[in-house]
Amino acid sequence: MADIPAHEPLFNTVNLGRVAAPNRIVMAPLTRSRSTPDENAQTDLHVTYYTQRAGAGLIVTEATQISTEGQGYVWTPGIFTDAQVNGWKAVTDSVHAAGGHIFCQLWHVGAISHSVFHDGAAPVSSSVWTPKGDAFVGDLHPDGPMVPHPEARALTLEEIPRLIEDYRHAAKCADKAGFDGVEFHGANGYLIDQFLRTSVNTRDDKYGGSVENRVRLLVEGVDAVIDVLGADRVGVRLSPAGGPGGSHDENPMETYVAAAKALSGKGLAYLHVVRSGEPENTKIVDAMRKAFDGPFIVNGGFEPAEAAQWINEGRADAVAFGRMYIANPDLTKRISRDGPYNQPNPDTFYGGGAKGYTDYPTLNDTAQAAE
């Protein structure tokens, strides 16, 4: 009997909510900061970029802000205006024509921002907090492109219904733009995570204190998006490891397992969890897998062989690849052939044009050049 190729589990089909994915290789959300500076909209360049990667079982877009308040980086796209909807519609139409599936990641950065994005107003968070590090503001600030994060103010109870409505509006816009679904961004130290994490959330109302209270905004936001799209078109991303700005949680096992349990029973398309290289973090990811009752996607430095192993062992239903997808538009084909793989150029990750974005060669390009 012939040996089963190490990568074979990655090429089994899987249902991620309403999406019947032809493989278990997911393109992770990747901020690339190439949207138009005036309207934060997508262009023909983005159409090419995403269409090149349509072989993924599912594409999750770069993080996409739900409102002006939700922006924290220069040249990142939005999904709340007509211009942004139209820009994304060109992307989804092209991806679908190429046989692909694509979700829009709905994003609010919270405190990981700067007042230049908010007409001089302070960014918002769960509580008053000044993140460590710098905001990427490009040429919007005389001291740019990187300037320190200012102090963020706490969202008031009266503002939270408006925030929920922003998520609802963004979900409607994503639907108009032709997305197969959305990924609700609750990870990586951004706004929803700032409500989850004890190092940031010092509230004494119904959104602070106990783990049940800290999970509340996550659940309310997800439920609002479900009301618009249906649960089988909604995924959620969480990350128990620390995030930008120095945020962390005192008991991440308790907090993130509770979050996974709170998201169960809704019929979500998937839960997408980011691991770090720490053994304790991996234990938390495994515990979240057991706590959640739907499809489970993992992300975080996976090589194809390890990704296939996790699927084989039942620890995940699909694996999201980030940097490998930056450099390898035909990643599924390369994995099926055990490589070779292009190496990404970090100098072109953020900002710029086609260089380091749409010009990485495919296997076909390489073969033609050799002829």
Image: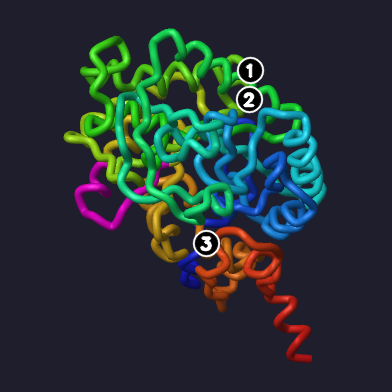
Specify start and end residues of the magenta stretch as a single range. 273-286
Secondary structure at badge 3 equals helix
**In 3D space, how far apart are the residues under numbered discs 1 and 3 (Cα atoms)?**
36 Å
Q: Residues within 10 Å of mark 2 (few under 14, many from 20)?
A: many
Quadrant, the C terminus: bottom right
Q: Residues within 10 Å of mark 3 (few under 14, many from 20)?
A: some
Question: Which residue is rendered at x = 30% and y = 10% of the image?
Answer: 206
Q: Quadrant of residue 110?
A: top left
Q: Quadrant of residue 105?
A: top right
Rendered image: mark on residue 228: 1
Question: Which residue is rendered at x = 57% and y = 75% of the image?
Answer: 342
Q: How many marks?
A: 3
Residue 235 visible in the picture = no
- Say which amino acid is labelled 2: Ala
| Residue at far top of view | 158
Secondary structure at badge 1 equals helix
Give yes or no for contact between labels 2 and 1 (Cβ–Cβ under 8 Å).
yes
Is 282 in front, or is 71? 71
> In the drawing, does residue 123 fall left or right of residue 203?
right
Q: Tell me if residue 284 is in the magenta stretch.
A: yes
Q: Is residue 361 above or below residue 64?
A: below
Rendered image: mark on residue 367: none
Residue that numbered label 3 is attached to:
8
Q: Earlier in the sequence, mark 2 or mark 1?
A: 2
Q: Pinpoint residue 111: horizontal percent, then vertical percent.
A: 40, 35
